[in-house]
Image: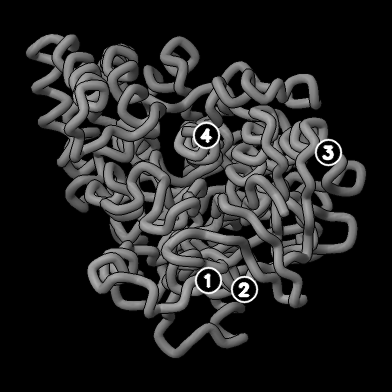
Amino acid sequence: RYDTIVIGAGHNGLTAATLLAKAGRQVVVLERRSQVGGLACRDEFHPGYSTAGVLHDTSHLRRRVVDQLELKKFGLELLREPAPVLVPEKDGPGYLHWRDPGKARDEIAARSPSDAESYGAYRAFIKKISPVIRRLFDEFPPDTQAQQLSQLWDLGKKAISLRMLGRSDMMELLRIGPMCVADWVAEWFETEILRAAVAAPAVVHDMTGPWSPGTNLNLILDEALSGPSVKGGPAALIDALEKAAIAQGVEIRTEARVVRLNLQEGAVAGVALANGEVLESEQVAAACDPKQVFLRLIPPPLLSMEFERNVRHFRTRGTTAKVDLALTDYPEYAGRPELRAVAIRTGTTIDGLERAFDPVKYRDFALRPMLDVFVPTMEAPQLAPSGHHVFSVQAHWVPYELEGGWTAEARDRLLGSVVDTLAEYFPTIRQSIVGARVMTPVDLEKIYGTTQGHLFHGEHATDQLILRPTPECARYATPFRGLYLCGSGSHPGGGITCAPGALATQAILG
């Protein structure tokens, strides 16, 4: 018997477990796989070659969580800022995208002096609105049905922070949120490759392209919530989280698949495991995605019709595939032979991104998909043999339900499209490849338990960000007493942030 059972040993599950243990709770974490980390775990995909996780971006990791868990004591090292992203060109030097406007100035001015000035103004605007965005998305979610004075005061503080921007900036923020990201970046910049570089983070992992309405909100969130990234990528974060959890006395069980939540009179009483074991607890925190919790672990008759409908309508259409490449060297980029970028993203125009998005609407993927490449061996060379490298590739706008199904031929076609796209910029990459692995959204669902392979446990659409995942569970508690959500399907959303795990503990601890 435990004070709290946590289902899932990803970054959010480990965060919640450690914070609960620090508060004096006896906690066990149950992980269905043979290792902790979930979508952020180190994974050997070819003998001697490992990735640093399915997810790449650690720049949204909340600094407050790092301090609360004292992760630096356990080896976590934060970089001063995220690595610049190389946007390669077929015939040209490409564009190296820095967040810092000072470092970006020369790179942008070489194409457009006016855009270099505009980028500084753009960053100044983001800096001005960031405190308001953080108050909304980095704190305990507001109670939209508040009645008590304390709850109304919390809502009031958030409204006041928005008003304190000043009328002009407040109205601008309200104007740009519902926009498509293509329109907003066009208001700022004239250089097409700069527009694409700025806009791309707004449309990854969702069934949206740059011309889709509402995508600009995701760009604002990405910019406002970004900070220092983790040296060594997601796997380095998991190493520190696991050590912190063990230091606080958390019991971690791997290969412990939960098959049922035990409920008594509307309250949680524990869980049943696949091996027949039953663990008792009056408190369960689920870091797995909401559809797994309510549609797989709880018998359907126990869900109200409205609640079940809300859960089923929470959109989880996975649109990202993962391709890992084991390389004997770092293939030379023709545009800048001396450059060894840590992060690479393909797509030099807004319309090019839209064309890569279009096929997914018809259950297909583009011949030249948009690729996000992370080279973890630049920061963690131990992930490959000496001098060798790993290209960890997210291929975007790849459907879960492919027309004709994910046959062996379809997987080969996807791998070919990824390698062909990279070869346009890195001509020698084919000769460097000694091993490859393809994980479609279907594979990601099977391996990691994410419904339809969605890496954020649910789309980041406007209607799925505030009351996430459903109105009944928007503040982590669920209709079942003692059962809480603490994963990426909860506020403030997916990605490697540790925020849902940390904020859910406030609800769990009362």
The residues tagged by marks 1 and 2 sit, at their Cα atoms, a distance apart of 6 Å
Image point 58% across, 72% down: which residue? Answer: 260
**Camera-side mark, 1 or 4:** 4
Residue 297: image tag: 1
Residue 381: image tag: 3
**Camera-side mark, 3 or 4:** 4
Residues 202 and 191: in front is 202
**Camera-side mark, 2 or 3:** 2
For badge 3, the amino acid type reads: Pro
Image point 69% across, 31% down: which residue? Answer: 24
For badge 4, the amino acid type reads: Leu
The residues tagged by marks 2 and 4 sit, at their Cα atoms, a distance apart of 26 Å
Asked if disc 2 and disc 3 are in contact, CB closer than 8 Å, the reply is: no
**Pointer 1: residues within 10 angstroms few (<14), some, or many (20+)?**
some
For badge 2, the amino acid type reads: Val
* Residue that mark 4 sits on: 509
Q: In this rendering, does residue 75 appear at all?
A: yes
**Pointer 3: residues within 10 angstroms few (<14), some, or many (20+)?**
some
